[in-house]
Amino acid sequence: MLIRLLRTHLTPYKKPIGLLVLLQFLQTCATLFLPTLNADIIDNGVVKGDTGYILSFGALMIGISLAQVVCNIGAVYYGARTAAAVGRDIRAAVFDRVQSFSAREVGHFGAPSLITRTTNDVQQVQMLTLMTFTLLVSAPIMCVGGIVLALGLDVPLSGVLLAVVPVLGIAVSLIVRRLRPLFRTMQVRLDTVNRVLREQITGNRVIRAFVRDAYEEERFRKANTDLTEVSLGTGRMLALMFPIVMTVVNVSSVAVVWFGAHRIDSGGMEIGALTAFLAYLMQIVMSVMMATFMFMMVPRAEVCAERIQEVLDTSSSVVPPKAPVLELRRHGQLELRGAGFRYPGAEEPVLKAVDLVALPGETTAVIGSTGSGKSTLLGLVPRLFDATDGQVLVDGVDVRTVEPRLLARTVGLVPQKPYLFAGTVATNLRYGNPDATDEELWHALEVAQAKGFVEGLENGLDAAIAQGGTNVSGGQRQRLAIARTLVQRPEIYLFDDSFSALDYATDAALRTALARETAEATVVIVAQRVSTIRDADRIVVLDEGRVVGTGRHHELMADNETYREIVLSQLTEAEAA
């Protein structure tokens, strides 16, 4: 999976990668050539006392060293740029794929896991790419070149290499084999820490209100301890790597000096050759150590690549139409024909054969007990997820065939839990219409009964809004979300229990102002509060995903037992009448 991911995203950078490999080859060849020159200086210059020979070959070594430095700097430069570009491209690909997900796919992965995959997982793959370009490319060249040159210096002494390289390879492979499952567990537990921390930060007020600080501290401590334990396990395995490598290096160095001394004593080898052989041995072992360092990163990067590819391979259940409808009649008629929705693997559908018609200039209300599918019904219209049965039609056209941007302009949704982005009041209101003027923003705020409190904020429209709108109250957040949809001016307004945080006076004033503002549009309201929807032109009653009644308030009170129970749970008989 790692190779597949990298092959896909490295393809556009063939030229810089080719130049990088050439520079790494040149600098490695220069590094390998230096011990041979050093041996020549010792045997023909130092031993014979030829100062001129030492100076001339010393100058050559300095020139080769400078060339090696220049090539190394160039290789690292191109390697760093390419690795950073690959990381950027993978993050962009994951982001684009997540943006195309419906609520079903986002719920499947979970927000904390998607954040970890986009940040930490991509960072691990990017780091492996960088290390590959800076270390791994030169390691095999140095290892093979070192062995060849060492054999050229002294074949009998090269027998030490036959024992060193296999021992190092076996030791490294055994450790790497144990690391892979540990790194997979580490990424999963990192997801858990991210999720717990995210919940505790978001739900800070709830935790304090219920005095659950100790419970949440213990919950985080457990998640943190689990991550620490697996991190220590990987650390212990990694800690074995370098001692094993250094032990083999030191033992082999002693063996080379021991046998080399006997070779020199017997006249079969010169002192310079032994010095060069030791240098080549160190270069061979260093190349193995560089490869070892890479192998330590590969298991974790491989796990991260699998997690990233899992996101990239997941297709959204909301598929853009191949031949999209680019124009609607712009009347705003909404119709559901036998619409149903079932989550994957669920035993029962959330919605079953729902028939509903909402006409322009009318207000259609949807009411039902908790879990009856009201929010799911509204989510089908803007294609937060697609109906698994039946059709959802806007102006007689199935929403699955409408061009997504056109559908977004036609349908405006105020969700049950409105979200405000970090920025200002103005940037949030212009989210649906970037070209809206200040006058249009103030008009939308006035209709949404939010003008008064925005005027009271420092800087007014330019007042800062924190991420999620946490620096304003729930009611203010709902009113700003309503104003944001009014600025968009769609043909169909969907209000998903968007008045729940408002007091009765504000609720009444807002509904009156909305009725004037949306007089020619189609309005669909989902609400728990009967007073919010009792004056609607049409009330649809949902029960366990089915439509069990449609009509006006007085009609349903007379002949629909489900609606009557809901109403009398909030109002007295006299108030309901």
Image: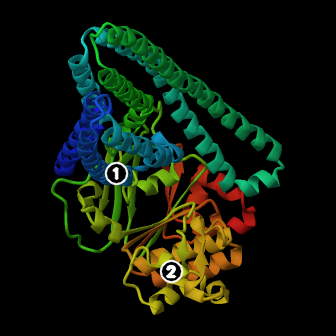
Circle 1 packing at 10 Å, graded few (<14), some (14-19), many (20+), is some
Mark 2: give few (<14), some (14-19) or many (20+) Cα within 10 Å: some
> Would you name the residue on which mark 1 appears?
80
Residue situated in front as seen by the camera: 498 or 185: 185
Q: Amino acid at mark 2?
A: Ala
Q: How many marks?
A: 2
Q: Judge whether residue 350 can be spotted in this image.
A: no
Q: Position of residue 526 (x, y in %)?
A: 53, 61
Dot 1 amino acid type: Ala
Q: Earlier in the sequence, mark 2 or mark 1?
A: 1
Q: Is residue 242 shown left or right of residue 323?
A: right
| Screen quadrant of the N terminus | top left
Kindly tell me whether residue 380 is visible in this rendering. yes
Q: Label 2 belongs to which residue?
A: 515
Alpha-carbon span between mark 2 and mark 1: 59 Å
Q: Nearer the viewer, residue 369 or 139?
A: 139
- Residue at x 36%, y 13% (from the top left corner): 260
Q: Is residue 508 left or right of residue 345?
A: right
For the rendered model, the colour scheme is rainbow
Does dot 2 land on a helix, a strand or a loop? helix
> Which residue shows up at 33% across the image and 9% down it?
263
Residue 63 in the image, given as x and y percentages of width and height: 25, 49
Can you tell which mark lies on residue 201?
A: none
The image quarter containing residue 352 is top left
**51, above or below 336, in the image:** above
